[in-house]
Amino acid sequence: MTTFASPRLASGFAVRRSDITVRADVNYARMEPVVKDLLDRFNHPLTRLGTLTSKVQYGSSSKAVDEAVGTPMIRMTNLQDGDWDLDVLKYTILDEHEQEKYLLAKGDLCLTRTNGSKDLVGKCAVFREDGSWIFASYVLRVRIERPDEYLPEFLARFLNSEVGRVQIDRLSRQALMTNINSDEIKQIVIPHPTPDVQAAMVADLGSHQDRYRDRLADARKLLLRGDEEIIARLGLRPPSAASPLAWAARRAALTAESGRLNAEFFHPERLDTVRLITEGDTPSFRVDAIAEFVKDKQTGIEPGDHYVGLAHIERDTGELLAAKEADDDLPTGDLMRFKAGDVLFAKLRPYLNKVHLAERDGVCSPEFFVLRPSEGIRGEYLAAILRSQITVTQTRHMAGGNTHPRLTPADVHAMFIPVPDDDKVQHGIADAEVANRHKARNIRAHATAEWSAAKQRFGDALVA
């Protein structure tokens, strides 16, 4: 097996003006020998992507809304590594006539055309969903003219592979945002195996991806076992979800409990959860009695800062997805400093349940509360409780605002948290959290390594 490895790129070089035939671009010129070497080594006939397509089109720049009304819109955040993440969607309110030209068809290839990170430009996946969907302006739609001759799935796998990304890296332009346009996409040179070879390569890689997904699902189950531990050790099972059409609250309660006229705050599900915690056998405390609300601020990112934003935290599990030390879109305003052992608790959209136990010092978005556990309270325990359903059933009825629901400091200060008086119970929950997280991370690491190796073999099969 031949392994493709990019030649070392020059840190300094010169190009004669007469040799510039396409564009005066340092990155483009620097990548020239790398691309030429690769194209010479492909072991299948070559063709340009533009000759295979019937349509290469930018998406709609219409406003998208969070409410599930209208037609769902594919955005660059929904595109993953040859796959889709459709958990969080936005919707267009364009009328049917205006959205018609942006409607996706099964077999369309969707590519990210611009991003703050160069590595994410050109990531793509084949659209296979039922129903009406449109795509947003930061996404390119590529439609293959003869999908029986050139499989869209093969094209997506190639463009996501290392040997495909070489050309994307060369063509993409980097300024405030990295981007690649429709004409440049058409210029990408594609190897053209016979359809049966394409299908076999896609099927082989697909089987590895299925295994990868299964192992990630196993890891996620481990990360979500906190609720099971809380139920088993504290006996606190969240009340059944209640969705009444109407409910009532006494006028005296409006002042005594919240000081605000907020019907959702008095939703039966929240009130039942509070009663479950405060009237149970386990002692309960307000959050501000068991944790300090840290307000250590700084302005902008400083050299060496470890930055955590909302997008870096995986929903429900609290795992750190990416802590980018160098990013083109880092914030310049106020940030919050935190220390290892602090708990970052998201203010925005609490239903996403983003709660992270920091494992190193750093700075975070002001859209987090930084909670420092009091003496006798383990950070792992506090994070597990804040991430559990007995907290989510409170916070999802407390946040104010329709488009961007957000928790206030008063909301979180007044939340109730169970804290067992037997330290062994708290340590049991915290230790189980640590053990499950360790196992899950090992599973994810091995799964990712195997998946990366499978993708590498896919690319290797195309070059001599």
Image (cartoon, rainbow, N blue to C red):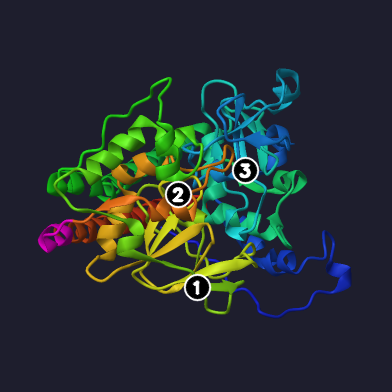
Nearer the observer: mark 3 or 1; the answer is 1
Res 251 quadrant in image = top left
Q: Secondary structure at mark 1?
A: loop
The kind of residue tagged 1 is Asp
Res 120 quadrant in image = bottom right
Q: Earlier in the sequence, mark 3 or mark 2?
A: 3
Tag 2 residue: 458
Tell me where the magenta segment starts and ends, as one range. Answer: 420-427
* Near-viewer residue (8 or 134): 134
The kind of residue tagged 3 is Leu
Q: Which mark is residue 296?
A: 1
* Near-viewer residue (96 or 281): 281
Q: Indicate left or right for 307 with 360 as reference.
A: right
Q: Earlier in the sequence, mark 3 or mark 1?
A: 3
Nearer the observer: mark 2 or 1; the answer is 1
**What x and y, as percent, mark residue 233?**
13, 49
* Near-viewer residue (173 or 295): 295
Crowd band around label 3 with a 10 angstrom C-alpha radius: few (<14), some (14–19), many (20+): many
Q: Which mark is residue 111?
A: 3
Residue at (24% x, 46% y) in the render: 278
* Residue 421 belongs to magenta span: yes
Would you place residue 146 above or below residue 66 in this image?
Answer: above
**Circles 3 and 2: CB distance less than 8 Å?**
no
**What x and y, as percent, mark residue 381?**
25, 59
Nearer the observer: mark 3 or 2; the answer is 3
Query: Marks 2 and 1, how far apart in space?
Result: 49 Å
Res 291 quadrant in image = bottom left
Pick the quarter of the image with the N terminus: bottom left
**What x and y, as percent, mark residue 386?**
33, 52
From where the camera sits, is residue 351 visible? Answer: no
